[in-house]
Structure formats: structure tokens, C-alpha cells
């Protein structure tokens, strides 16, 4: 195998005011997610995991990291994650997808996994509508992208379905709820990377 398979992890995290009640838990969960990606990269050394990390609220969309190796991603803390304001969910999803698509479009040696976490309904987007996001997600799924929608305090299944996402995690806004989310996400991520590993083995055997 001449080069590693790139795995892009696009994480879109709600930073609206309602997330303040689980601020500590979200910080811990995000940092645990990074550690999980690092562990998976070690377990599957043929994979190179890159992270793009966005947070969003009514004050704007913050692009913390764009396609950076997971080993270079710093943990977040109370200074970096400060929930406030409204929920421009669609704008954050749209911006994250469009940014990453521009960098990986046309490449056949990479995989993309988009992880969206929010605790409420869209209420502040200006550029993207539900239909635009659904169309965009459906387009990227045809190119092999995987999407996971994690939500609390709203009809998670309904919202995920409206924007064409089948994989979803419902979590409760509590310490135990976030711990359960981390366990579910870890299992999904491991399964995803294992599938990539098996796919690469098949390709290697065909060479």
C-alpha cells in the first residue's frame, strides 16, 4: 500500500445558549471524541484521520480546525466553548459541507464522516433552508459521505429524516446522557473505521 487512506472527520457542534446547561459535559465529550479518533488511528495505521471542527450560534460560525491531523487538534475548554445565542443549524451544516467538499471533491482515496450535535431546532439560518441542506446531504451521500445526527430536547428522528440523515443518536442532557452518547459514538466510529479497513484489504488483494 503506497499511501494511507484519508478519513475526514467533520464535527459540527451546537454552541447556542441552550447548550450551556451541559457545557462541562459537552467539553468532556468532545475531548473524549478526539481521543477516540486518535486511538482508532493507532489501531488502523493505514488510516490517516483529519479533523475539521466547527461550532455555531447566532453570533456566527466558528471554524476552529480545517482538515488538520487529529494529533494536532487541541482539546477544548471553557474558553473555547462558550454557549450563547440562537441556533443557525442549517447554515453551520451547509458551510461545513461546502468547505470540505471543495477540498476533497474528485478524490477517490478518502472517506468523509460528518458528525452533527445539537440540542434544538433550527431558528436562525440566513443562507440555507431545510430543503437546501437535504439536497446537499443527499448529493454528498451519493459520493460516499456518512452523516450522523446527534440530538437532544427535540424530535431528533423527525429532524434527521427531514435532512436525509438515517444514522442518529438521541442523547439526554445530563452527565449520564453524555456518557451514553460517547459510548454510542465510539461504537459507530469503530464500525466505520473497521469497514474502511476491510475495504482496503480487498483492494490490496486485487493489486
Image: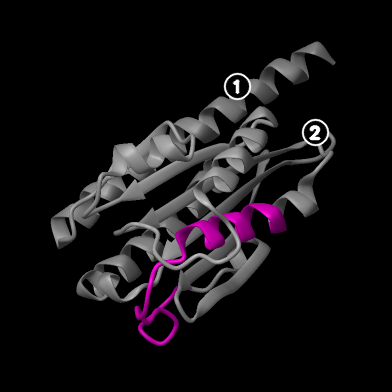
Residue 91, picture quadrant: bottom right
Q: Residue at x 53, y 41 (%)?
A: 43
Residue 31 drawn above or below residue 98: below
Q: Looking at the picture, tell me which residue is in the foreground, 53 or 96.
A: 96
Regarding residue 44, the answer to whether it shows in the image is: no
Tell me, yes or no, whether the highlighted magenta stretch contains residue 71. no
Residue farthest bottom in this picture:
79
- Could you tell me which quadrant the C terminus lies in? top right
Q: Position of residue 29 (x, y in %)?
A: 33, 61
Colour pattern: one colour
If you read the primary sequence from the N terminus, does the residue marked by circle 1 or circle 2 appear first?
2
Residue at 79% across, 53% down? 103
**Image check: 182 left or right of 41?**
left
Examine the structure image and report whether residue 88 is included in the region drawn in magenta: yes
Q: Position of residue 85 (x, y in %)?
A: 36, 79
Relative to 63, 35 lies left or right = left
Say if 30 sits above or below 159 in the image.
below
Q: Is residue 86 left or right of residue 112?
A: left
x and y percent of residue 122 in the render? 40, 59
In magenta, the rendered stretch is 75-99
Location of mark 2 (residue)? 108
Q: Look at the numbered disc 1 and give the secondary structure of its residue.
A: helix
Q: Which mark is residue 198?
A: 1
Residue 100 in sight in this render: yes
Residue at image point 30% right, 44% down: 156
Distance from the alpha carbon under mark 1 to that under mark 2? 16 Å
Amino acid at each position: 500500500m503506497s499511501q494511507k487512506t484519508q478519513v475526514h472527520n467533520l464535527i459540527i457542534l451546537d454552541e447556542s445558549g441552550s447548550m450551556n446547561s451541559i457545557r462541562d459535559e459537552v467539553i468532556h465529550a468532545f475531548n473524549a471524541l478526539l481521543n477516540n479518533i486518535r486511538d482508532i488511528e493507532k489501531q488502523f495505521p493505514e488510516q490517516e484521520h483529519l479533523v475539521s471542527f466547527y461550532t455555531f450560534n447566532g453570533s456566527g460560525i466558528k471554524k476552529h480546525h480545517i482538515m488538520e491531523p487529529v494529533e494536532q487538534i487541541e482539546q477544548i475548554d471553557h474558553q473555547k466553548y462558550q454557549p450563547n445565542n440562537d441556533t443557525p443549524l442549517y447554515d453551520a451544516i451547509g458551510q461545513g459541507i461546502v468547505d470540505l467538499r471543495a477540498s476533497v471533491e474528485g478524490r477517490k482515496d478518502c472517506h468523509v464522516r460528518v458528525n452533527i450535535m445539537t440540542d434544538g431546532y433550527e431558528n436562525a439560518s440566513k443562507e440555507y433552508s431545510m430543503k437546501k441542506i437535504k439536497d446537499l446531504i443527499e448529493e454528498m451521500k451519493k459520493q460516499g459521505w456518512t452523516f450522523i445526527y446527534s440530538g437532544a430536547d427535540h424530535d431528533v428522528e423527525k429532524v434527521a429524516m427531514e435532512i436525509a440523515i438515517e444514522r442518529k443518536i438521541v442523547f439526554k442532557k445530563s452527565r449520564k446522557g453524555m456518557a451514553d452518547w460517547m459510548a454510542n459514538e465510539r461504537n459507530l466510529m469503530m464500525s466505520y473505521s473497521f469497514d474502511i479497513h476491510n475495504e482496503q484489504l480487498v483492494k490490496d488483494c486485487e493489486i
